Image (cartoon, rainbow, N blue to C red):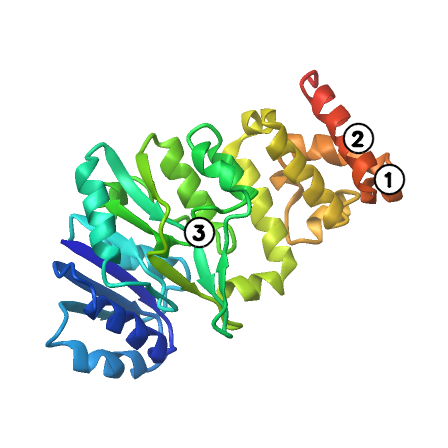
Amino acid sequence: MVSICVPAYKKPDFVIRLLDAVLLQDYKEVEVVITDDSPNDDIHMAIAPYSGQLNIHYHRNIPALGSPGNWNSAINRSSGDFFMLVHQDDWFENPQALSVFVNALTKKPTASFAFCKNIAQKADGEYMVLQAIPSLLTNLKAYPNRLLLAQVMGPPSNVMLRAEVKSIVRYDEKFIWLVDVDYNSRLIKAGYDYIYLDQHLMTIGLHKDQTTEFCRDNEDIMFRENIWFAHKIGNTAFRDIKIYDYYWRLLRNYGIRNIHDFCANQLDPTEMPELIMFMLNWQSRIPFFLLKFGPSSKMLMAASYFFSAFRK
């Protein structure tokens, strides 16, 4: 059985669209677990007509758990052999989607999860393939931290996992912006094998009310979470020049020139990772116009990366 875990919050029309897509699936061994953070009964009432058509388990969170606490709650309540965390604004693209996931994992019992092509649909109906660095798909085992550069796996809705994974890897409730990057990279680092399905099985709905849009409008959240992620991956991750370059550009693009700028993002000085401090010391001695000019910034980054190997 597949557990479709839906962490809901308002927008009952999105939940209805998702349930309609589940009804169309040719794979029928399904339970739908809905954990609801809404302040009212709108979603509970909206799903009532589906009670005789789908195996639905509904739970209202009082108080609301927030994101991603609600994600973990939905997963915890699942009982299937496989589970998917499907956001309410996403949906199955075709009736064979679930079957494709299940068949792939059944044929490869060593794989603990499978994910499909990351495709989104804008409000105007236009589709977008959100895999900026497709070559990363073949290098994830070697470079899981590079999901920072391009989240080729996409959001949780693209992924089906075996039940045993849920007790080992959980969503870190400290994160909002990088929560799926953190989760997916830890899945791979934990040694779980995976399958990539180069098919349009899920559609990610894009709209202005998403958490993603909220984070983009609050850049301090994005900067802060990148620093937290740097703490989690540790100094050895910065031996990868792509990761080093990512954080070099992060400091430059956010105009972080000193410890005061760093703390202005609601961070404590003790939260600055060693390699970030090393980069900041380098950048603070470089005229900002050189950092803003791409070629010179890249050369300076490379020099900094080289000398970082000899720091005490």
Give x and y (percent) for residue 19.
25, 71
- For label 3, the crowd category at 10 Å Cα-Cα, with few meaning under 14, some 14 to 19 and many 20 or more, is many
Q: Earlier in the sequence, mark 2 or mark 1?
A: 1
Q: Quadrant of residue 51?
A: bottom left
Disc 1 to disc 3, C-alpha distance: 34 Å
Element under label 2? helix
In the image, residue 276 above or below residue 199: above
In the image: residue 36, left or right of residue 307: left
Q: Which mark, residue 300?
A: 2
Disc 2 to disc 1, C-alpha distance: 9 Å
Give x and y (percent) for residue 194.
32, 37
Q: Earlier in the sequence, mark 2 or mark 3?
A: 3
Query: Which amino acid type corresponds to the residue marked 3 in the rendered image?
Result: Gly
Q: Earlier in the sequence, mark 1 or mark 3?
A: 3
Q: Quadrant of residue 248?
A: top right
- For label 2, the crowd category at 10 Å Cα-Cα, with few meaning under 14, some 14 to 19 and many 20 or more, is some
Query: Which amino acid type corresponds to the residue marked 1 in the rendered image?
Result: Leu
Q: Quadrant of residue 98?
A: bottom left
Q: Nearer the viewer, residue 67 or 5?
A: 5
Name the residue beneath numbered marker 1. Answer: 290
Q: Residue at x 49, y 37 (%)?
A: 136
Query: Marks 1 and 2: in contact by CB < 8 Å?
Result: yes
Query: Which amino acid type corresponds to the residue marked 2 in the rendered image?
Result: Leu
